[in-house]
Image (spheres, rainbow, N blue to C red):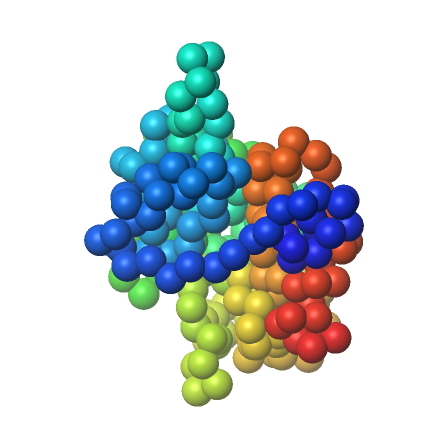
Amino acid sequence: MHNAAFAALGLNWRYLAFEVDPKNLRAAIAGAQAMNFAGLNLTVPHKLLAVDMVDELDASAKTWGAVNTIKFEPDAVGRVRAIGFNTDADGLANSLREDLAVELRGAKVLLLGAGGAGRTAALKLAAEKVAELFLVNRTVSKAEEIASEIKKQFPSVKISVGYPKANVDLILNATSLGLKPEDGSPLDEKQFSLKQTCAVYDMIYQPAETKLLVATRTAGCKTANGIGMLVQQGARAFEIWTGQPAPVAVMRRAVEGSVYGF
């Protein structure tokens, strides 16, 4: 999607993929810095490690505690500094608005998963001033840790661990359940029915339709997968590096063509 965006704007740039062992991450960042790269994207397991490997953290990286985008920028004396950003949280919020037309402020949300993606999602939802947030995770203590963190940072948000009794506006899956064909649904429908919501977002985008989304569509709810989040976080990274508005539609077509073949 980045190469398609560069081409669309006539930029003589190139986006390349490199597989880096975590133990070599610091050296890889320094190498890219020395070779005058404009920046980097990082994926798991590098996002948390990079927090301590950059010269400066943007407010986004400080807030969400992870770095998925680095920009190399010269300072006043010409020294190139590595600045860490996090575009995942904004990417999720933008995708929820674009793909599901969900108004997060004042919404009631059931969040499945309390890993790295779940934590970022929970904090972003709280920052967007959802009214109520229900956290469900296989390891309850992880959900309780996030709930405690949110209570301190966002005391106006009502937060609970476990399935809600009443209806919610959105179910958000931040688990990895659904990546494999044999995976079941992350939602325990014995404890919470799809009839109790009108929209479901699954952060997984491959396959395009997980078992959760199939069940959701059958139930008549609005659905969206994580392809929008992938595009939106990429668009924000593009803007950080180039200083230009991202051609989001071009990027989305490129992603869908690559992932789904159309």
Query: On the rendered structure, is 178 left or right of 53?
Result: right
Examine the rendering and report whether any part of residue 90 can be seen. Answer: no
Quarter assignment of residue 51: top left
Considering only vertical position in the picture, is 101 above or below 255? above
Residue 161 is situated, as x and y percent measured from the top left of the image, at 37, 52
Q: Residue at x 76, y 44 (%)?
A: 9
Residue 205 is situated, as x and y percent measured from the top left of the image, at 57, 68
Residue 174 is situated, as x and y percent measured from the top left of the image, at 46, 60
Examine the rendering and report whether any part of residue 212 can be seen. Answer: yes
Task: Decide which of 241, 235 is in the foreground and name it.
Answer: 241
Identify the residue at the far left of this view: 23
Identify the residue at the far bottom of this view: 182
Q: Which residue is drawn at 37% across and 56% down?
A: 44
Q: Which residue is drawn at 66% across and 64% down?
A: 255
Task: Decide which of 208, 190 is in the foreground and name it.
Answer: 208
Query: On the rendered structure, is 15 left or right of 258?
Result: left
Query: On the rendered structure, is 111 left or right of 103?
Result: left
Task: Decide which of 225, 47 is in the foreground and name it.
Answer: 47
Quarter assignment of residue 49: top left
Task: Decide which of 26, 51 is in the foreground and name it.
Answer: 26
Q: Quadrant of the N terminus?
A: bottom right
Q: Quadrant of the C terminus?
A: bottom right
Q: Which residue is drawn at 74% across and 62% down?
A: 253
Query: On the rendered structure, is 166 left or right of 118?
Result: right
